[in-house]
């Protein structure tokens, strides 16, 4: 697996898209901090971008890479290498290079603006952690979609739809159900609904760490009691890990049974 | 002859006055060892000078015009047995005492200093700690509460008292006081024509300043910080609120300022910074909001209902999560020439005001008003999208609620 990972990773790290992605974050970080040198405010703005953009790039990049390297994969399959090693190697190659672009791209500007000396370091690390989790999750989901669909167009369609669902439609349904069932106690429901969607979970985790949590009023108090505690934090981390593991396991399962 | 007699009489009067305004000293080695004893000994308009030391006394009744003055902050310890100083005479001055351990009761409002039905009192430079009620004025007018420091350690609302309380007291000047850790920092009930200036009220359990049924009052240049619920102004008319600072009143039920049934008020040059709700307005009419700064609040202005003919002009709205929130489609309030940091319009004729009107009410704030739980979707992409579509064509928010001339640059 290490060899495939290494080749995929180097292949991607040298590719133009990785550089563009990296430079985008680099520019974003510098511009944000240049306009407003308050680190914790920059973290909020970044959050808005990260929770939308990272899943989108993860899904598109994941599907694209899978379809593009299909011939190479078939070549590898002819070699005496375990299937799971090939696919997991590729997956970690993609997710790793995307995460690296994100972490370095944002890390450099924040470091130069004195992150280590500020108390925003925890918020920032949480943001990066969440960004990396989202990359892992959505690249994994993208690989799953790609491996299940031979048709490129269909695969892309599903991938984009998945992103749209998680980032927008899910919240729409969530909102509607909150309005429809407003007569009922909704604390538990909204907590569960938030936990089930990795994008919402990431957003809530970061929001509650920032001091706008009081805005959330009573609901916020309920949320804070859950997410604000050690237990809540670890539960949400566990959910994120599950969201990462399940697509990987399915990918492994699918890959070992797929007829190429 | 008669003239010299008058003169002699005059001198006599002057002499006796001079004698009358004498000073009774209280200290551990003096002939008079207790404040109570000194008050009993003193004649009208005398000064009781309390030297440095600790005096274990309570229920000190001042029933004649006196000046009770402390030297080097003598400690008056009530040992939690009840009220400490009670003033029932006009023209009393209390100055420079350190009063601690007021009794706590569930049936009587024990105060460190209580002024009852008296006029022309002055309470100044007093430090109060471990108190129940601090300075309690009842039916006492034309007085001054100046430069006192009240530091409570209130934990629960039901067994704590207010820092400075005015009840049926008029024309009182409350200034330069520091109140913290009480239930309500400053509380006014049925008290008209009060001036409250340059006070600091912080970390109180409930309100930093609380008005009830009090008209024609002015409060200016005060600072209200980190109070449980901010400042509440209720059921009052003609209140002028100027140059105050409301900061960091954070919490699920915290306001910078809560206005309820307030009419004809004037709110100018105040700064609201980092409050959950900067101003919450309910049933308040004919109020002018001018030149205020709203910075980084959750809600800058939350209108709950029945607010008519209010004018918002020349305010700065900067980086608030919601600028204005309304719970109805009806709007009779005017927004004019404010600066909104969320404004995205342009100014082609370069006259300093934007060419397209700004709509301060977001659809999300309308939804969050109806179903508070939806606030968990704060800052999600979906909300941004529907806010944008509502901005383009308002359906749910009052369509005449707009600032037709938003400022391009913030008012300095």
Image: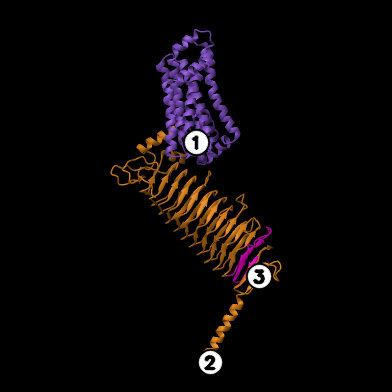
Extreme residue in the left direction: B349
One can see residue A164 in this view: no
Tell which circle, 3 or 2, labels the residue nearer the N-terminal end.
2
Q: Do the residues labelled 2 and 1 touch (CB within 8 Å)?
A: no
User: Quarter of the image holding residue B82?
Assistant: bottom right
Q: Which of B345 and A32 is in front in this view?
A: A32
Tell which circle, 2 or 1, labels the residue nearer the N-terminal end.
2
Q: Which of A198 and A34 is in front in this view?
A: A34
**What hue does chain B carry in this figure?**
orange
Tell me the residue that label 3 is attached to: B25
Q: How far apart are marks 3 and 2 (CA)?
A: 42 Å
Looking at the rendered structure, whether the residues under marks 2 and 1 are on a common chain is answered as yes
Residue A219, image x and y in percent?
A: 53, 38
Tell which circle, 3 or 1, labels the residue nearer the N-terminal end.
3
Q: Residue A100 carries which label?
A: none
Looking at the rendered structure, whether the residues under marks 3 and 2 are on a common chain is answered as yes
**Image mark 2: chain:** B
Tell me the residue that label 1 is attached to: B376
**What hue does chain A carry in this figure?**
purple
Judge the density around disc 1: few (<14), some (14-19), many (≥20) Cα neighbours within 10 Å. Answer: many
Tell me the residue that label 2 is attached to: B1
Is B80 inside the magenta-drawn segment? yes
Q: Are marks 3 and 1 in contact (CB under 8 Å)?
A: no
Q: Give the range drawn in magenta.
A: B60-89
């Amino acid at each position: 697996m290490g060899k495939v990972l290494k080749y995929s990773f180097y292949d991607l790290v040298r590719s133009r898209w990785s550089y563009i992605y990296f430079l985008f974050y680099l520019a974003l970080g510098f511009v944000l901090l240049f306009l407003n040198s308050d680190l914790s405010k920059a973290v909020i703005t970044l959050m808005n971008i990260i929770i939308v953009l990272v899943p989108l790039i993860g899904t598109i990049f994941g599907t694209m890479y899978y379809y593009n390297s299909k011939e190479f994969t078939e070549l590898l399959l002819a070699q005496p290498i375990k299937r799971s090693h090939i696919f997991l190697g590729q997956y970690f190659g993609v997710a790793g290079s995307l995460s690296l672009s994100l972490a370095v791209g944002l890390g450099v500007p924040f470091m130069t603006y004195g992150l280590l000396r500020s108390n925003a370091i925890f918020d920032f690390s949480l943001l990066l952690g969440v960004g990396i989790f989202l990359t892992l999750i959505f690249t994994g989901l993208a690989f799953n979609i790609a491996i299940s669909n031979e048709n490129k167009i269909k695969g892309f369609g599903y991938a984009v739809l998945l992103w749209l669902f998680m980032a927008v439609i899910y919240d729409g349904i969530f909102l509607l159900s909150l309005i429809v069932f407003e007569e009922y106690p909704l604390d538990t429901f909204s907590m569960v609904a938030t936990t089930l969607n990795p994008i919402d979970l990431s957003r809530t985790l970061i929001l509650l760490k920032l001091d706008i949590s009081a805005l959330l009023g009573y609901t916020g108090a309920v949320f804070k009691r859950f997410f604000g505690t050690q237990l809540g934090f670890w539960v949400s981390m566990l959910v994120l890990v599950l969201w990462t593991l399940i697509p990987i396991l399915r990918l492994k399962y699918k890959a070992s049974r797929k007829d190429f | 002859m008669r003239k010299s007699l008058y003169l002699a009489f005059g001198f006599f009067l002057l002499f006796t006055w001079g004698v009358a305004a004498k000073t009774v000293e209280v200290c551990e080695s003096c002939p008079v060892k207790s404040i109570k004893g000194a008050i009993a000994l003193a004649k009208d308009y005398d000064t009781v000078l309390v030297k440095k030391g600790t005096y274990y006394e309570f229920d000190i009744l001042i029933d004649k015009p006196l000046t009770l003055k402390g030297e080097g902050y003598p400690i008056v310890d009530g040992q939690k047995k009840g009220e400490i100083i009670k003033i029932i005479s006009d023209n009393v001055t209390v100055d420079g005492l350190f009063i601690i351990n007021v009794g706590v009761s569930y049936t009587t409002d024990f105060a460190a200093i209580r002024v009852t039905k008296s006029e022309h009192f002055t309470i100044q430079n007093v430090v109060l700690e471990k108190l129940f009620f601090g300075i309690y004025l009842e039916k006492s007018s034309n007085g001054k509460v100046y430069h006192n420091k009240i530091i409570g350690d209130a934990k629960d609302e039901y067994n704590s008292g207010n820092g400075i309380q005015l009840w049926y007291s008029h024309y009182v000047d409350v200034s330069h006081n520091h109140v913290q850790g009480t239930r309500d920092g400053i509380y006014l009930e049925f008290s008209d024509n009060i001036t409250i200036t340059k006070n600091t009220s912080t970390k109180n359990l409930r309100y930093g300043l609380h008005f009830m049924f009090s008209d024609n009052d002015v409060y200016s240049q005060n600072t209200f910080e980190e109070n449980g619920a901010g400042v509440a102004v209720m059921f009052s008319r003609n209140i002028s609120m100027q140059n105050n600072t409301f900061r960091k009143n954070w919490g699920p039920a915290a306001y910078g300022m809560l206005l309820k049934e307030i009419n004809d008020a004037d709110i100018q040059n105040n700064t609201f910074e980092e409050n959950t709700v900067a101003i919450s307005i309910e049933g308040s009419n004919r109020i002018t909001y001018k030149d205020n700064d709203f910075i980084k609040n959750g809600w800058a202005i939350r209108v709950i209902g029945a607010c008519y003919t209010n004018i918002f002009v020349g305010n700065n709205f900067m980086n608030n999560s919601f600028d204005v929130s309304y719970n109805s489609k009806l709007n009779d309030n005017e927004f004019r020439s404010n600066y909104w940091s969320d404004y995205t319009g342009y100014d082609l004729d370069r006259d300093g005001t934007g060419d397209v009107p700004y709509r301060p009410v977001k659809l999300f704030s309308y939804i969050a008003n109806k179903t508070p739980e939806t606030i968990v979707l704060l800052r999600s992409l979906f909300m941004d999208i529907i806010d944008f579509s509502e901005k383009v064509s308002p359906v749910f928010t009052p369509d005449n609620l707009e600032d037709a001339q938003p400022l391009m640059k913030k008012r300095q």
